[in-house]
Image: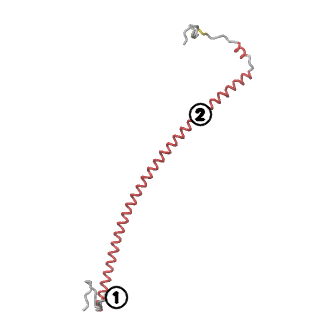
Amino acid sequence: MLDHENGGRRRVDGMVAVAAEPTAKCAKKDKEDPLVRRRNELVLLDANARAEGERRGKELVREAKLEAKRIKQEAKLEAKRIKREAKLEAKRIKREAKVRAKRLKQEAKVAAQRLKQEATGTFAEDLRSVCKDLKAANRSWGACFPGFGRRSSTRTCTKTACSPSP
């Protein structure tokens, strides 16, 4: 805070402080060897460079830690997303498998019924054919199948296609 007309500053005791004249120390500095002065400048530059390097190194380490933390967080989020998608995919596959199993079961039932009807039809045809042959030969059912109806050797086919023997 400048409050004196010649640019000086007011001290605590109220006196005005003005720039001092060069002292003996400054005069001695002017007479120093230029190599010594250059060496001192280089030492100071080296100290400043080291301090700046340490400061910049700490800053880089801090930035790297923040970047690593950010990447780690992104990886966690990505892992959660993938896990969530995998669960959804697993549910979808289970649903599809359930539907497919139900469809296959229904197809198997239909195929079993068809095979049963075919077998029943074939058996009925064979039975009618045998009964017809028995009727034509006028033989009993038991004569065609030994051991069938052992109580009575005159037992004949009772199916509608067959008529009882006389």
Residue 116 against residue 130 in the figure, above or below: above
User: Colour mode?
Assistant: secondary structure
**Residue shown at 31% from the left, 82% from the top:** 125
Image quarter in which the N terminus is found: top right
Horizontal side of residue 152 vs 71, given as left or right = left
Residue on which disc 1 sits? 147
Secondary element under disc 1, as helix, strand or loop, is: loop
Please tell me which of labels 1 and 2 falls first in the chain: 2
Percent across and percent down for residue 90 are 43, 55
Q: Residue at x 35, y 71 (%)?
A: 112
Depth check: 118 or 149 in front? 149
Nearer-the-camera pick, 119 or 13: 13
Residue 78 coordinates in the image, percent (x, y): 48, 46
- Disc 1 to disc 2, how far (Cα)? 105 Å
* Residue 15 placement: quadrant: top right
Q: What's the residue at 52%, 40% (across, down)? A: 69
Q: Which residue is mark 2?
A: 58
